[in-house]
């Protein structure tokens, strides 16, 4: 485990006040910039027997326990059914349960194993339901000495005011584009600029998006959007019926790019498909384009429901294709 290149300055600020860290720190910012990893590294550093300004030593018993996932003075709370998914439209449970919170509260009533710091990383904090949040409030407000809660949030506005009021909020910045591109190249990503653009400047999302099978699915779907009049839209929807969330995210970004292209001649997300987007935007009625975008964006709420994915996606594709058919 190590810091990302864009986190050095923030790390120095945090480690300069080891003994003055707040008992509850809310790390917030966009998904895919490394907030969870930063929280984990900070927890490891707090528990280390020989920490330095650069981080944990990596060799003491505490660091070895941490690396093996069995440190007695550390707890990681994540949604019970799956780790937090950063990608839009991903199905599945994303709630932290009351039982998980109660287990941590009970853990904090016990004496520290090493007689030093204890750390709890909770992410995503917006995964706390009302009952789970209420179960955490008293401990979050008055934790035992030398206990630090590190909450990670992509969407802090979704947190209960009672949780927000008990935390010191710290915005985690994303990297500059040049830094992110250089890091992605170091990870052997072949087309870092385009993937970074698609990911909204989030390098960890871009790295996930570089997976070859996903890239093949992306190119196939975007090819269908580029020429919908030549595409069997029912067949295309059938190909992606098990990945409707993924297809919805591509369609929303494509529509954003078409709207932006009409207004400025530029694109934001699919910079490797500029010509196709300009051709798609040519002659489309802007009012109908906005209406389709808003409706499909709103329909994203159905991604969490067990509906027929193929029919849902097919309806969106037909509406999109109709925008060009009535030019």
Image (tube, rainbow, N blue to C red):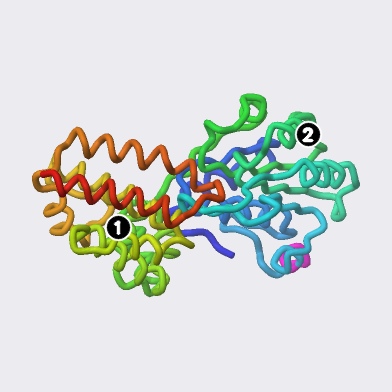
Residue at the outermost right position = 110
Q: How many marks?
A: 2
The image shows residue 302 at horizontal and vertical percentages of 49, 44
Q: Secondary structure at mark 2?
A: helix
Residue at 38 percent across and 74 percent down: it is 188
Residue at 90 percent across and 47 percent down: it is 111
For residue 135, the mark is: 2
User: How many angstroms separate mark 2 from mark 1 (CA)?
Assistant: 43 Å
Asked whether residue 23 appears in the rendered view, the answer is yes
Q: Quadrant of the N terminus?
A: bottom right
Q: Which residues are magenta?
A: 60-64
The image shows residue 206 at horizontal and vertical percentages of 39, 61
The image shows residue 54 at horizontal and vertical percentages of 56, 58
Q: Quadrant of residue 177?
A: bottom left
Asked whether residue 8 appears in the rendered view, the answer is no
Along the line of sight, the residue nearer the viewer: 214 or 272: 214
Residue at 67 percent across and 51 percent down: it is 78
Along the line of sight, the residue nearer the viewer: 309 or 12: 309
Q: In the rendered structure, does residue 44 fall within the stretch colored magenta?
A: no
Along the line of sight, the residue nearer the viewer: 89 or 176: 89
Along the line of sight, the residue nearer the viewer: 105 or 186: 105
Q: Quadrant of residue 228?
A: bottom left
Dot 1 corresponds to which residue? 178
Image side of residue 174 versus residue 94, left or right: left
Q: Is residue 231 above or below residue 32?
A: below
From the image, state whether disc 2 or disc 1 is nearer to you. Answer: 2
Q: Is most of the magenta stretch helix, strand or loop?
A: helix
Residue at 15 percent across and 52 percent down: it is 280
Q: Is residue 105 above or below residue 269?
A: above
For marks 2 and 1 on the same chain, the one whose residue lies earlier in the sequence = 2
């Amino acid at each position: 485990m190590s810091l990302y290149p864009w986190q050095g300055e923030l790390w120095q600020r945090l480690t300069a006040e080891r003994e003055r860290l707040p008992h509850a720190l809310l790390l917030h910012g966009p998904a895919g910039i490394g907030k969870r990893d930063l929280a984990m590294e900070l927890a490891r550093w707090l528990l280390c027997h020989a920490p330095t300004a650069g981080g944990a030593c990596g060799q003491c018993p505490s660091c070895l326990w941490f690396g093996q996932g069995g440190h007695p003075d550390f707890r990681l709370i994540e949604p019970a059914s799956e780790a937090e998914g950063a990608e839009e439209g991903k199905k599945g449970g994303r709630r932290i349960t009351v039982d998980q919170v109660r287990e941590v509260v009970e853990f904090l009533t016990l004496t520290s194993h090493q007689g030093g710091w204890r750390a709890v990383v909770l992410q995503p904090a917006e995964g706390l339901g009302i009952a789970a949040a209420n179960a955490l409030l008293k401990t979050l407000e008055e934790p035992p000495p030398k206990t630090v809660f590190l909450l990670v949030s992509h969407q802090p506005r979704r947190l209960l005011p009672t949780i927000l009021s008990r935390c010191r909020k710290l915005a985690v910045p994303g990297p500059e584009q040049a830094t992110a591109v250089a890091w992605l190249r170091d990870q052997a990503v072949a087309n870092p600029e385009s993937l970074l653009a698609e990911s909204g400047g989030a390098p960890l999302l871009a790295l996930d998006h570089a997976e070859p099978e996903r890239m093949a699915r992306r190119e196939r779907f975007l090819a269908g959007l580029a020429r919908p009049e030549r595409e069997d839209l029912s067949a295309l929807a059938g190909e992606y019926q098990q990945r409707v969330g993924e297809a919805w995210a591509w369609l929303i970004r494509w529509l954003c790019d078409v709207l932006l292209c009409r207004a400025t001649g530029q694109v934001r997300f699919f910079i490797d498909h500029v010509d196709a987007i300009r051709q798609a935007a040519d002659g489309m009625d802007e009012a109908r384009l906005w209406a389709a975008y808003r409706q499909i964006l709103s329909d994203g709420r159905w991604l969490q429901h067990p509906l027929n994915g193929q029919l849902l996606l097919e309806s969106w594709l037909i509406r999109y294709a109709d925008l060009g058919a009535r030019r």
